[in-house]
Amino acid sequence: MDLKSHIPKPKRKMIKMVIQFVTAMFIITTLFAINSFMAYADNYSISEGVNKVAGAVYNGTSNSTHGGTSAIVNGVSYTRTGYLCYLLTKDGGTTGLPAYAFASPGYNGIAGSRWVCTSRRGQSVSSWKEPAPWQCTPWQEGGAPSNEPKIRDWFLQTGAGGKLNAQVFVLQYWGEAAVKNFESDEYILVIETIMNFQYSIAGGSGSNTPLVISPSEAKAITAAAREEAEKYMDNVPQAVLSGIAMTAQKSVKEIRDDWINQITEKAVEKIVNQMRADGASSNRTFTSDPLIGTVPNLIQYKGQSTVFNSYTNKVAPHAEKIKVSEAGFTAYTGSGSTQLSDSEVQSYGVAMLIIHCKNDAIHTYWEPNGSPGDPEPRLPGKTGQCNIVKGYYKENLTTGAKESLGVYYEKEVTSNIIVSGEPDFELVEWRVTDTTSTGVDPINWNPPGSPTQQGKSGSTLKLVDPEECVYVLLKQV
């Protein structure tokens, strides 16, 4: 017996309509893909990727190997930095508490780096604790501007439980007893900059001198180029990759991998050629392990080894610098644009911050006002019954003649006053008396009243009755 299906057969007209709809949708999708591909394709290519990758690695913007403003691969870079944090007594004595290292955000260290990191008070660290919670690098590209104000502001902002971030930070890493001493100003928090880079030696004196690229250097360059190539491909729109894959009859993954390989290979060739061109008169060959340490650590390592030509003295020491001599550290008040000598890096409190829990002190120098300029303004919490008067002058080096540059002042400030020199101005003397006058003469400096305190170097003062005014004399250098 023949069994006939009860399922109705589709009508020819309906089948034709379905086929036409599917065909139309395929054409629309294809045209959309092609149009999207054409819209973006001109902006992305292997050659464009090679140029971007080579520039990033060679000029120092790559995350894995860079030389800041130099062409030295694995040279000084603001992105490979961190902070060494430790507690001292207010007089500079050790507390017996450990030091900790905190990496800058986005830190990507050099493989095989060796720790040579010791604080100026002898505490050593050999690993990163975690990323720095203040979430910024010590300085920006090229060494300027410094992020010191941002870091200091973070510590003095109110955090969890109404406490300053500084209090929360000390409590978290050093405990209850430490934070009580910190809150009473018996302890201070000291921060030094840590860098991770690789020293290199300069050699060669003519165009006939070949540039020798060591295997470790070649490996570092290739790794950096591949990382940058992958990042470049991450930014290529999917429509472009799909269009290329359709044309080449390959998968998107195959196209991506092929481009990464080609871009890496050609970028490395371009970088090496550029290094050879630039290295004719200043040949560079790595001669040390990659190192992690503070600025003084790295300068000391340089002195003990026949290595390197880099930017340690020029860039890093100006990231932070203490402005007041305290706790056994000597303030550095020179220009931030000047390259320091090795001995200056070792002697001055450069590449450092000192944080006090009590933040009601007012500074005789206020960077936004400049020099010559008024002291720090009376911000909330910094008002009181005391006054600051500053006199500026310059001296003709040939004739010895002096010229007044003006008198600046701030009245009704807190009794906690930090006296310091200023960029391009040397601190000649400071004096505390019981009388205030804004009419003092910087040339014939003779503040009124009976001196109760005085000095010729930076200091943190706590005025008490009848002390009324701090007079500060500064000379242009």
Image: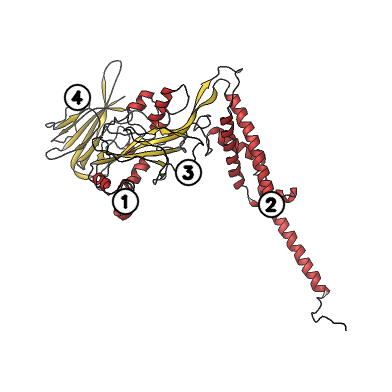
Q: Is residue 274 left or right of residue 134?
A: right
Q: Name the residue under label 4.
A: 444
> In the drawing, what numbered circle is on residue 106?
3
Q: Name the residue under label 2.
A: 242
Quote the CA–CA distance across marks 3 and 2: 31 Å
Q: Is mark 2 on a helix, strand or loop?
A: helix
Q: Position of residue 64 (x, y in %)?
A: 53, 38
Quote the CA–CA distance across marks 3 and 1: 25 Å
Type of the residue with mark 4: Asn
> In the drawing, what numbered circle is on residue 158?
1
Type of the residue with mark 2: Ser
Q: Position of residue 381 (x, y in %)?
A: 24, 47
Type of the residue with mark 1: Thr
Q: Position of residue 43 (x, y in %)?
A: 64, 44
Camera-side residue: 40 or 369? 40
Q: In this view, does 418 lie to the left or right of 29?
A: left
Quote the CA–CA distance across marks 4 and 1: 45 Å
Q: What element carries label 1?
A: loop
Q: Which mark is in front, 3 or 1? A: 3
**Where, quadrant-wise, is the C terminus in this rendering?**
top left
Camera-side residue: 414 or 373? 414
Q: What element carries label 3?
A: loop
Q: Say which residue appears at 71% left-offset and 48% top-offset.
A: 244
